Amino acid sequence: MPAQTTFLTTLAATLFLAGGALAGTVPAGTKLVVADQSEFIRNLLDASGEDDKITSDLELPNFAGGPAILEAMRAGALDIAYVGDTPPIQARASGTLLPIIATVQREKSEYHLVARTGLKIDDLAQLRGKRVSYIEGSGRQVFLIEALNRAGLTLKDVTLVPLRVADLPDAIRTQSVDVAVLQEPHVTRLVQQIGASTIADPRERELLPGTWYIYARPDALADPAKHAAIAEFLGATIRAAEWSNENRDEWGKDYYTGFQRIAPEDTAAILASQSLMQFQTSVEGIPHHQRLIDILAQAGELPETFDAKGSFTADFDPVIKAAR
């Protein structure tokens, strides 16, 4: 039996023997550290009122991208993390199994291919020869690879410029790259401030659904108190996401206009372009995760392909079903 499969089987048995009830009471004083990005989760919980229902000592440190989160996870500084679609794959490929406890998906990706000022790209094939930002281990990685696939290109057909996630907006401003994979609010800001442009090819909006994952440190899953805190947090986050789906104007005003300081008319444009957030169980999330693994493997970005089932735990599936 593969080592990773054995690990997950042992982990499930440990949780069962420890009595890690999914909806159990969180012991007083339990600390839960969750990696956030763009302070999205913190604002979502606050705006929806779900933060008042969390009884653990919750911390939400903010990070810029999956690589930094993985480093903190390996150091034991985090319990769970909200990451893009590629980080769990790269972590597992590097020998670090961080089980996925929930999948968050939007019908359309939140990523956009953004061209620098003075460069207009109307077709994905025009990416050939361009200087393109590249961040291995970030959700942007597989999005770019699939964009090139659709144009009949590969990573070898562009000039890759390795960057950190936090450096992407400035790379477009300074024209250090021709194209970067960005998400809001940076897309709208760069279009308005410096005349950057999104790629006009309609296929760019059909490349992949927007997929994020919540993955966990194995030691946190094996701790009954943290396990209960994770279940509580996950339920609150799913209910908060449902609230944002049903109260889009209020959510946009709070997060984009209030927190991100984006003009109301631009907030409206962002919301109009976004699909609703949908949480998926392990069974529902595995097929698309396998597709992502295969895309990266075929591009030579993984040493070998592997079975997506080994990256998930079904521990919290009942919580997801009950809360969504």
Image (cartoon, rainbow, N blue to C red):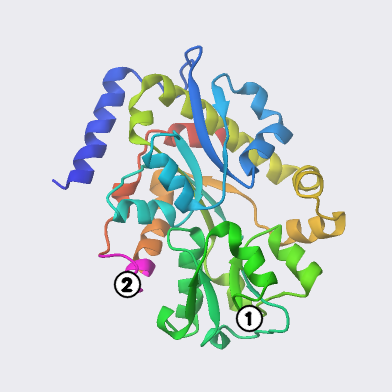
Check disc 2 and give the amino acid type.
Gly
Q: Position of residue 104 (x, y in %)?
A: 53, 48
Q: Is residue 301 highlighted in magenta?
A: yes
Residue drawn at (42%, 34%), measured in percent from left and top? 316
**In the depicted structure, whether residue 292 falls above or below residue 17:** below
Q: Which residues are magenta?
A: 295-303
Please state if 79 lies on the left or on the right of 195 as rendered.
left
Of labels 2 and 1, earlier in sequence is 1
In the image, 209 versus 89, the foreground residue is: 89
| Residue neighbourhood size for the residue with mark 1, other residues' Cα within 10 Å, grouped as few (<14), some (14–19), many (≥20) | some
Q: Is residue 62 rendered magenta in the image?
A: no
Q: Quadrant of the N terminus?
A: top left
User: In terms of image quadrants, where is residue 272?
Assistant: bottom right
Q: Nearer the viewer, residue 285 or 305?
A: 305
Label 1: which residue? 201
Residue 108 in sight from this viewpoint: no
Q: Vertical placement of 100 versus 308: above or below?
A: above
Seen in the image, is 297 located left or right of residue 71?
left
Q: Position of residue 41 (x, y in %)?
A: 62, 40
> SS for tag 2?
loop
Query: Label 1 amino acid?
Result: Asp
Residue at the spot 35% in from the left edge and 40% down from the top edge = 313
Q: Disc 2 marks which residue?
A: 300
Query: From what the image shows, is residue 125 above or below residue 283?
Result: below
